Image (cartoon, rainbow, N blue to C red):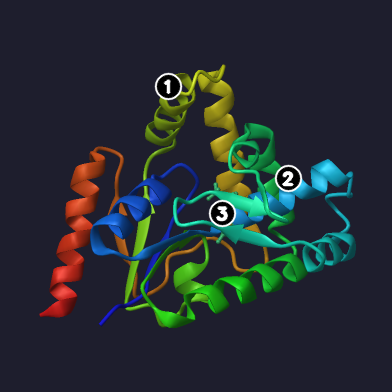
């Protein structure tokens, strides 16, 4: 029988990479909830909606569709925005708009609806605590700021995107602060989540560690 798996943690901890990998191996679906907050951020920037206007953001969400295909591409109103939502500027806007309860309620509702049939690996900040409190396995992935900034920096270089290590590192620290200090559903480890510090682990090692947790569940 399929279960739901929640993977939470700060930005650039490797949650999506692991979730994608595991989903492929287990035949599960992956839902990157950060991409949904990024879609709201991107659409608000594009439409010139004030990032501090909670009501306008909520109305915007009510009039837009966010969809994923099985390859992890993200669509706003059927337009593929997978690349645009990854821009560094959008990361900070996503963190800013994610503080609003009206924004969160709408996205959480969509996320629960998507995962109601089980077989999902969902990654984000509040999956184990709010979105799927009944998820059968909860993982909380952490890593030092330096390790995360290094990974992001290398990712940008690989993609040919100009990047500055110091700026990336400062942005990560700023987002960590915002995501853990917001009033509604701040980033926090669920009491029943297993914490994995990936600072000195390879992706393969993290995957093995989670697979061992899954095996233990089946015993
Ligand atoms: O995972 P990410 O870096 O793509 O997420 C972008 C921002 O979205 C993050 O800084 C905080 C917000 N977010 C959130 O509040 N809750 C989630 N479940 C996922 C992301």
Residue at 55 percent of width and 38 percent of height: 173
Spatial CA distance of label 3 from label 2 is: 12 Å
Does mark 2's beta carbon lie closer than 8 Å to ligand 1?
A: no
- Relative depth, front residue between 173 and 112: 112
Dot 2, how many residues are within 10 Å of its Cα: few (below 14), some (14-19), or many (20+)?
Answer: many
Q: Position of residue 202 (x, y in %)?
A: 23, 39
Q: Earlier in the sequence, mark 1 or mark 3?
A: 3
Dot 1, how many residues are within 10 Å of its Cα: few (below 14), some (14-19), or many (20+)?
Answer: few
- Relative depth, front residue between 133 and 1: 1
Q: Are marks 2 and 1 in contact (CB under 8 Å)?
A: no
Residue 94 shown left or right of residue 161 in the figure: right
Quadrant that contains the N terminus: bottom left
Q: Which mark is residue 34?
A: 3
Spatial CA distance of label 1 from label 3 is: 22 Å
Residue at 70 percent of width and 71 percent of height: 106
Q: Earlier in the sequence, mark 3 or mark 2?
A: 3
Disc 1 vs disc 3: which is toward the camera? 1
Q: Which mark is residue 42?
A: 2
Spatial CA distance of label 2 from label 1 is: 23 Å
Does mark 3's beta carbon lie closer than 8 Å to ligand 1?
A: yes
Residue at 71 percent of width and 62 percent of height: 65
The residue that mark 1 highlights is: 158
Q: Position of residue 170 (x, y in %)?
A: 58, 31
Element under label 3?
helix
Quadrant that contains the C terminus: bottom left
Element under label 2?
helix
């Amino acid at each position: 029988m399929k279960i739901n798996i929640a993977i939470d943690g700060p930005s650039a901890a490797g949650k999506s990479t692991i979730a994608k990998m595991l989903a492929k191996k287990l035949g599960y679906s992956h839902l990157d909830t950060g991409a949904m907050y990024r879609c709201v951020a991107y659409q608000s920037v594009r439409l010139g909606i004030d990032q501090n206007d909670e009501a306008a953001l909520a109305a915007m969400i009510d009039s837009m569709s966010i969809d994923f295909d099985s390859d992890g591409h993200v669509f706003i109103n059927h337009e593929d925005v997978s690349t645009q939502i990854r821009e560094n500027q959008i990361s900070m806007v996503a963190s800013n708009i994610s503080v609003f309860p009206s924004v969160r309620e709408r996205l959480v509702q969509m996320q629960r609806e998507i995962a109601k049939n089980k077989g999902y690996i969902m990654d984000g900040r509040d999956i184990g605590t709010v979105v799927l409190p009944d998820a059968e396995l909860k993982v909380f992935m952490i890593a030092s700021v330096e390790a995360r900034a290094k990974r992001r920096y290398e990712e940008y270089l690989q993609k040919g995107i100009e990047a500055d290590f110091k700026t990336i590192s400062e942005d990560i620290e700023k987002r960590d602060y915002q995501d853990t200090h917001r009033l509604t559903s701040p980033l926090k480890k669920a009491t029943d989540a297993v914490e994995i510090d990936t600072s000195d682990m390879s992706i393969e090692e993290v995957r093995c560690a989670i697979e061992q947790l899954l095996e233990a569940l089946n015993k």
